[in-house]
Amino acid sequence: MHVMTTLAADGVLRLLGATLLAFAPGLAAADCNDIEFEGAAFTLCEAVAGDDLRLFLQDANGSTHGSFARIEAALEPQGETLVFAMNAGMYHPDRSPVGLYVEDAQEQRGVVTSAGPGNFGMLPNGVFCIGAADFAVIESRAFAEDPQACRHATQSGPMLVIDGELHPRFLPDSTSAFLRNGVGVSDDGQRAVFAISNEPVTFHQFARLYRDHLGLSQALYFDGNVSRLHAPALGRSDWGRPMGPIVALVRPAENGS
């Protein structure tokens, strides 16, 4: 249901991207840090209400951005830069969103509430909503019944944590491990925490990172295996095949950057 890359190829590209960035001048300050949870390595990036957090899919000419570099290039003439960015939801082979997608308050694709194949269709799935004053992760059917006003929104699945409970289909003894990324939101909607695993982990462990380590009662899965992060201050910009929706924290570029 979405573009896949191999773990081996992504590993080489991650290392190359990090090496190049480590020597790049003028890196922006980032709200990201590396942690360990139950013996596995993760990177966390955080945005707070009032930050300029956006979704990106296509440029002004209708071409899909597909990469962090193309978004950076589009922002540069406006005097802006990326603090961090990651892929944000599943997409079709043409990189169009599988489910709900809202950018700059314009709905480009409607919410999907039916079950289906793959991780996206493993109900309950959910919507990440960037509102005017807060963030939310909302189960998709609840969102469809009571749509929220979102400046930006992306639908993905499955939900990782729903009202403090792990998704019912996650098994503690599962052996299905992938690189995974997602987002969780604080109960007051003032913090959004983005996480990516730096080694293969199971759904159960990834969900427990959000519930047990971060204490977040609502969290949504973005993707696995193709998961990528751009965090310049950590010397990291993962490379791979073109992506669909991308979520990014934007700030004015520093003079000389």
Image (cartoon, grey):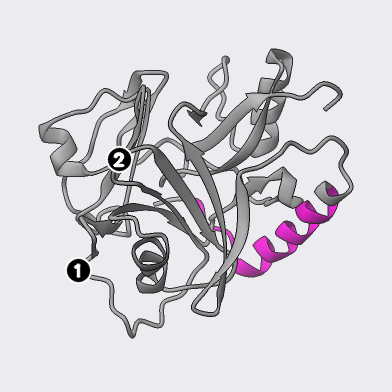
Relative to 130, say whether 218 is above or below: below
- x, y percent for residue 226: 54, 56
Quadrant position of the C terminus in the picture = top right
Q: Nearer the viewer, residue 150 or 241?
A: 150
Q: Amino acid at mark 1?
A: Pro
Q: Is residue 21 left or right of residue 180?
A: right
Q: Position of residue 152 (x, y in %)?
A: 39, 27
| Mark sitting earlier along the chain (1/2) | 1
What residue would you read off at disc 1? 168
Secondary structure mainly formed by the magenta segment: helix
How far, Cα to Cα, is label 1 from label 2?
A: 25 Å
What is the number of callouts on the image? 2
Q: Is residue 4 magenta?
A: yes
Quadrant housing residue 256: top right
**Residue 136 appears in which quarter of the rendering?**
top left
Task: Name the residue that disc number 2 marks.
Answer: 188
Q: Nearer the viewer, residue 130 or 145?
A: 130
Quadrant for residue 86, please give it.
top right
Instruction: Give, as a single range, the part of the protein colored magenta.
Output: 3-20
x then y, percent, for residue 5: 58, 59
Residue at figure coordinates x 39%, y 52% from the top left: 1
What residue appears at the point 36 percent right and 65 percent down from the top-left corner?
207
The answer to whether residue 56 of the structure is visible from this angle is no
